[in-house]
Amino acid sequence: MAGTSSPIPHETAHSYAAATDHNSILKSIKEVAESPNLLSNIPSNYAYFSKPAASAVRADNTDCDSIPVIDFSLLQSASSDQRSKVIRDLGDACQCWGFFMVVNHGVPKILMESMLDKCDEFFNLTPEEKLQFEGKHVLDPIRCGTSFNTSVEEVNFWRDYLKVMVHPIFHSPSKPRGFRRWRWDDFADELPVDVLKRIAAIKVYPNLEDIEYRTHVLRSCIAVWEVWNYIKPARHGTHDLRLGFQEWFIGNIQQTTIRHVARVLLRGISASLGLDELQIERSMDWEMGQQILVANYYPPCPRPDLAIGMPPHSDHGLLTILAQNQVDGLQIQHNGKWVPVHASPNSFLVNTGDHIEIFSNGIYRSVLHRAVVNSRETRISLAIANGPSLNAMVTPAPQLIDKNRDSTGARYKSMAYGEYVQLQQSSRLNGKSALDNLRV
Ligand SMILES: O=C(O)CCC(=O)C(=O)O
Ligand SMILES: [Fe+2]
């Protein structure tokens, strides 16, 4: 079974690393890492491990080749035998690991690369430019910062982040150029009414009836094609309008396809629990489901044996889909050992979140994972968290309550997803402490 219910205590060693002034407003880790004063040691407030022997870098020697791999295309196979087999594999992966690698997912490589590039550009904005996206509240739709929650943590992590809520309402920082998919204001007044109507219908997902993915993409393509043609002979004919459309289109597809991957996986997971394949979606109000893009930036660290990018934790939500810039660093806990994950090119790394654990009444567990850093190259990861609607009250599925022989009923109390996110994000990132609050 992946993960354990008890958080792993972290170790601090302020005496080991060089002393520093720990300001209340912490510099970004990018600035710290690029500081000319940073030679071979790290400021003491980043020393997570008490001694190099406790290093995260040397993970336990478990064979990472055994990490389950799910061929996404088989989940949509016309052959029911193939589908049944991959659903069983998915169930085994959730039960034994809480983690799997997804290949053949259909999200174009170029889209993931463009997202990684744009996030890299974001982290390279000046501190003043980034300040406007800092956010004040954990549920603000766009916020960036360093570490995890500097107002409550004793030790800081070697990590900067950008968090953007992209569903049900699509948000996007206005910088860097191209991060936004939508330059509506630039041309809305110029378009014919029927085209405007069609685009508005596509833009606002919840207003659409339960459309299927292909129809959705097809409609987007038609609208883009129409607008593209409209823009071409337009009076102003500016290059920018076309570029704006291209960005919007890419953003739209990115969001749709990653949500599509998450949705199909959740259908498989629901079926693997012996339930209707739509039960997870229905009970989580998926159409209004929260999707958050978390971009993590881990610059090279002179003491990767002392610092940590992200400490052991589980994620809120249902499934986190992670892509990275070819630099490994994720480790997952399996049978009490840390297993380093090597991602195949163009794969997604997927982990089950706390709300899968709650929904399945503990049959599937959210997996403990952490991110380690290295001394050579910057790692960027995009963790796309797919969760219930913020208003959804998440409870164990009624059919699963009696399935656990050692359980007399529901193992978790219910809580609105939004409240849970708020709780987890305002606390110290510490193992599965947020979920522990809900255990019966
Ligand atoms: O960067 C990684 O590999 C892990 C990121 C992560 O766990 C998170 O953003 O929740
Ligand atoms: Fe995580």
Image: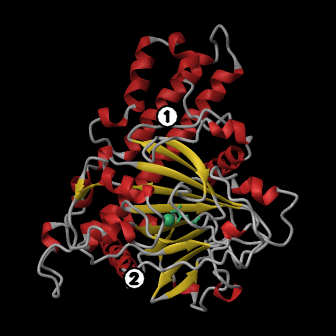
Please indicate whether residue 127 sits to the left or right of residue 271 in the image: right
Residue 79 showing in the rendered view: no
Q: Which residue is mark 2?
A: 4
- The local crowd at label 2, few if under 14, some if 14 to 19, many if 20 or more residues have their Cα within 10 Å, is some
Type of amino acid at the residue the image marks with label 2: Thr
Taking depth in this image into account, of 68 and 213 the one nearest to the observer is: 68
Q: Nearer the viewer, residue 272 or 352?
A: 352
In percent of the image, x 83 and y 56: which residue is there?
A: 35
Q: Look at the numbered disc 1 and give the secondary structure of its residue.
A: helix
**Where, quadrant-wise, is the C terminus in this rendering?**
bottom left
Query: Could you tell which of marks 1 and 2 lies nearer the N-terminus?
Result: 2
Between 385 and 153, the one lying in front of the other is: 153
- Say whether marks 1 and 2 touch (CB < 8 Å): no
Q: Position of residue 421 (x, y in %)?
A: 38, 55
Q: Is residue 357 left or right of residue 229?
A: left
Task: Farthest residue to the top: give it.
Answer: 235
Q: Which residue is mark 1?
A: 221
Q: CA distance from mark 1 to mark 2?
A: 46 Å
Q: Which mark is residue 195?
A: none
Query: How many neighbours does mark 1 have within 10 angstroms: few (below 14), some (14-19), or many (20 or more)?
Result: some
Image quadrant in which you'd find residue 99: bottom left
Amino acid tagged 1: Cys
**Is 438 located above or below residue 126 in the figure?**
below
| Residue plotted at (41% across, 52% down) | 260
